[in-house]
Image (cartoon, rainbow, N blue to C red):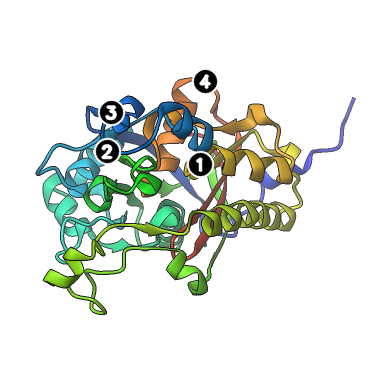
Amino acid sequence: MVTEPSAASELSRKAPRIGGRPTTIASLATYVPPRLLTNADLEKMVETTDEWILQRTGIRERHLVDPGVAASDLGTEAALQAIANAGLRPDDIGVIVVGTVTPDMMFPSTACLIQHKIGARHAWGFDLSAACSAFNFALTTASQMVGSGAHDHALVVGADVMSSIIDYEDRATCVLFGDGAGAVVVSAARPGDGAILDFEHEIDGGGGPALCMPAGGSLQPSSHQTIDRRLHYVKQDGQAVFKFAIRKTEEISRRLLERNGLGPADLDLFVSHQANRRIIQAATERLGVSPERVVINIERFGNTTAATIPLALNDALCSGRLKNGDLVLLASVGAGFTVGAVLLRWGF
């Protein structure tokens, strides 16, 4: 009996829109520092409770670096494992794209530091600042470079030490964030591999004041005044970000699916940026994605900014929820505002 092919199976045979030749995620690795900050620990630091944090965010614990450990250190750990998992050497990497809002320093870039630490002698690279959408933006950028034929292998790193810019006297923000890193190798796809199929990104600078770190740049360089006013920490209008994130996660995901002739039921897995359990649940309910196809692991890591999506992918892979051939949608909303979605067929 011959049946009509599904939209999802037809999509897997199309040449990807994202580049001139097919590209794929060839490997994945993550790293989090071993030290934990639990909700019980936070109860001793600010006026909050475990119940309050868990009900409003879904977070139980987060990982924090020890003093002197930087974003490049976390990124290096994930990068070396991702390269090894792909069966490659650092010298095989042609370009490194690092998504981060917590670089080791203003310059040199974190990409330069990671390139040196891993010994990727033939690679060039740069940092990409898109906050919580940084991994999706960096993945798309690397895929375009490999798809163009400029490089056979690119390294994408999402790494943030959010504890370095969090005010642990501000109970509205200090409960949310953790530190971590994730890395993938993007390579030219071979027959039978998965594929990075399509993307949809946008920015809305009008939302900048709702989530930002006001000082430390050229507008308000570091001074006694900016330090005294605690302007080198994350500042957030929680309600504005919450509403925007729900609306835009649904909108951009739906737009990407519809352009490819797909619906939510065609997805095997939906992997959102992990900012808040209620945001993910509300957005996916509006979109119509079944809860069993949604990855939520924020309870273990908090919001690690550029690292949340690879950490969620890794958890899904290790638990058997992510399998070769699965159709996966990655979605994110971050400061800027930045909004991103990537559609891919998993497999390596």
Label 2 vs 3, first from the N-terminus: 3
Q: Is residue 320 above or below residue 270?
A: above
N-terminal of the two: label 3 or label 4?
A: 3
Please tell me how crowded label 2 is: few (under 14), some (14-19), or many (20+) other residues with Cα within 10 Å. many
Q: Quadrant of residue 26?
A: top left
Disc nearest the viewer among 2 and 3: 3
**At label 2, which amino acid type do we have?**
Ala
Q: Earlier in the sequence, mark 4 or mark 1?
A: 1
Mark in front: 3 vs 4: 3
Residue 165, image x, y percentages: 25, 53
Q: From mark 2 to mark 4, how far is it between C-alphas? A: 21 Å
Q: Which mark is residue 78?
A: 2
Type of amino acid at the residue the image marks with label 1: Asn
Type of amino acid at the residue the image marks with label 4 = Gly
Return the residue found at the far top. Answer: 319
Nearest to the eye among marks 1 and 2: give it.
1
Which residue is under mark 4? 320
Q: Amino acid at mark 3?
A: Asp
> Which mark, by number, is residue 112?
none
Which corner quadrant of the image does residue 102 belong to?
bottom left
What residue is pinned by disc 3? 41
